[in-house]
Image (tube, rainbow, N blue to C red):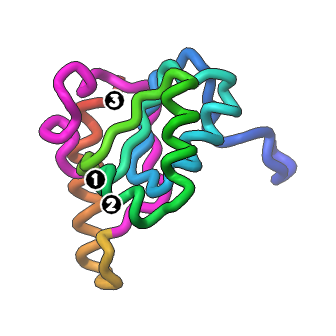
């Protein structure tokens, strides 16, 4: 509001929105989003890593992914945020109401690489936003 206090969340999520979550390493954000929305039927949760890499890096991921699937989410792996049309499976490169990319990073501490990642992401995401 005009008094400087927040009038609510900057972005609201609900079960009817088609939501794509990018780079959700252990998929815990997507699980929290599912709980918040009360359903995961419209959540597409993704990782840059392969399923094997996810299981290797995050011991809890198997349980989290099972909960997401049970809730109706679509977990995907090896999704490149800078190449969404190319790496989302056919039929999943549909339009989304929300795209969440919480911690975009190139894996490098080099500022120019992270800037390039963001530029490439913004170019890519415009093709999948409703």
Which residue is the site of mark 3? Answer: 129
The image quarter in which residue 85 lies: top left
Q: Is mark 1 in CB contact (under 8 Å) with mark 2?
A: yes
User: Is 55 colored magenta in this rendering?
Assistant: no
Q: In this view of the protein, which residue sits in the foreground, 81 or 46? A: 46
User: Is 101 colored magenta in this rendering?
Assistant: yes
Query: In the displayed image of the protein, which residue is found farthest to the bottom?
Result: 109
Mark 3 or mark 2, which is nearer the start of the sequence? 2
Which residue is the site of mark 1? Answer: 50
Q: Is residue 8 left or right of residue 130?
A: right
Residue 35 position (above or below residue 10):
above
The image quarter in which residue 76 lies: top left
* Magenta span of residues: 82-105
Residue 19's spot in the image, x, y percent?
Answer: 46, 30
Q: In this view of the protein, which residue sits in the foreground, 83 or 126? A: 83
Residue 105's spot in the image, x, y percent?
Answer: 36, 68
Residue drawn 27% across and 22% down? 94
């Amino acid at each position: 509001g005009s008094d400087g206090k927040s009038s609510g969340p900057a972005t609201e999520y609900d079960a009817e929105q088609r939501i794509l979550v990018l780079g959700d390493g252990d998929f815990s954000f997507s699980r929290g989003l599912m709980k918040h929305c009360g359903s995961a039927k419209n959540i597409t949760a993704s990782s840059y890593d392969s399923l094997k890499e996810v299981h290797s890096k995050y011991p809890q991921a198997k349980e989290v992914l099972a909960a997401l699937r049970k809730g109706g989410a679509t977990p995907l792996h090896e999704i490149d945020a800078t190449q969404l049309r190319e790496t989302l499976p056919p039929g999943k490169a549909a339009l989304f109401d929300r795209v969440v990319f919480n911690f975009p990073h190139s894996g490098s501490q080099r500022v120019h690489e992270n800037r390039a990642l963001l530029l490439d992401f913004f170019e890519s995401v415009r093709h999948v936003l409703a």
